[in-house]
């Protein structure tokens, strides 16, 4: 049940309407998460979409990005983002078993993705300086310094939508996560 005001995307005007039209062209729908953000702050939606667009140009593959999103969403307990990113992950070729592994910190069958998701999980569940061993471990899995910084960008992006959906209790409009 929504806690923040949310205008139906079809009735939006101004900057939100423009953003929704672009989202609908790209996804075929305006997900509830984007509708709640745009209803309350078109600026925040524009920024979130900008981060996501930047990630598509980053040094990370789509699977790398989804590994981060799954790990962070599981750690934060965001059921909306878990549903959305489980759906997206399967669409880009990550198996259901691998999705569960990436979410829960179990082997997914891809050691590099496991290292990325484990690193992201560590970053969002701890505080203070990250142990040098954790940075070395992700590098040993084949992740470059540039990719580490891009992982931080991916964490920033998904953390925002996790927070919005946790505050709002956004109704899920994707198949439920396994």
Image (cartoon, grey):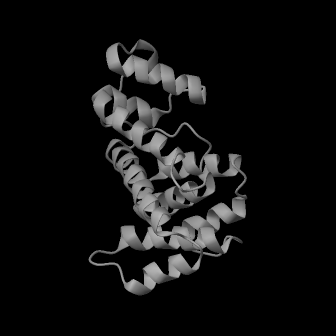
The residue most toward the bottom is 133
Q: Name the spot of residue 43 as percent of width and height, x first.
A: 29, 31
Q: Quadrant of residue 165?
A: top left
Please give left or right for residue 76 compared with residue 97 in the image.
left
Res 76 quadrant in image: bottom left
Tally the numbered discs: 0
Image-quadrant location for residue 17: top left
Percent from the top left, x then y, of residue 81?
Answer: 49, 49
Q: Residue at x 34, y 41 (%)?
A: 168
Answer left or right for 81 relative to 39. right
Asked whether the viewer can see residue 48, the reply is yes
Q: Residue at x 31, y 28 (%)?
A: 42
Of residues 175 and 38, the one drawn nearer to the viewer in this rendering? 38
Return the x and y of residue 91 as percentages of the image width and height: 69, 46
Question: Which residue is at 48% across, 46% downward?
Answer: 80
Q: Is residue 28 above or below residue 84?
A: above
Q: Is residue 7 positioned above or below 145 on the image?
A: above
Q: Nearer the viewer, residue 86 or 122?
A: 122
Which quarter of the rendered picture does the C terminus lie within?
bottom right
Q: Where residue 23 sits: x, y (%)? A: 51, 27
Q: Is residue 8 visible?
A: no
Give the quarter of the figure containing the N terminus.
top left
Horizontal placement of 36 versus 56: left or right?
Answer: left
């Amino acid at each position: 049940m929504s806690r923040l005001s949310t205008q139906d995307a079809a009735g939006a005007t101004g900057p939100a309407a423009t953003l929704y039209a672009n989202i609908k062209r790209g996804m075929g729908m305006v997900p509830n998460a984007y509708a709640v953000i745009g209803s309350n702050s078109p600026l925040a939606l524009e920024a979130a979409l900008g981060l996501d667009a930047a990630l598509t140009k980053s040094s990370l593959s789509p699977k790398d990005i989804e590994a981060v999103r799954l790990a962070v969403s599981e750690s934060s307990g965001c059921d909306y983002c878990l549903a959305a990113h489980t759906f997206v992950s399967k669409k880009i070729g990550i198996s259901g078993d691998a999705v569960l592994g990436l979410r829960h910190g179990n082997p997914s069958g891809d050691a590099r993705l496991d290292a990325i998701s484990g690193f992201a999980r560590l970053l969002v569940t701890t505080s203070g300086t990250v142990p040098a061993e954790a940075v070395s471990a992700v590098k040993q899995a084949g992740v470059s310094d540039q990719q580490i910084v891009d992982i931080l960008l991916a964490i920033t992006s998904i953390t925002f939508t996790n927070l919005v959906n946790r505050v709002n209790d956004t109704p899920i409009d994707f198949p439920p996560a396994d």
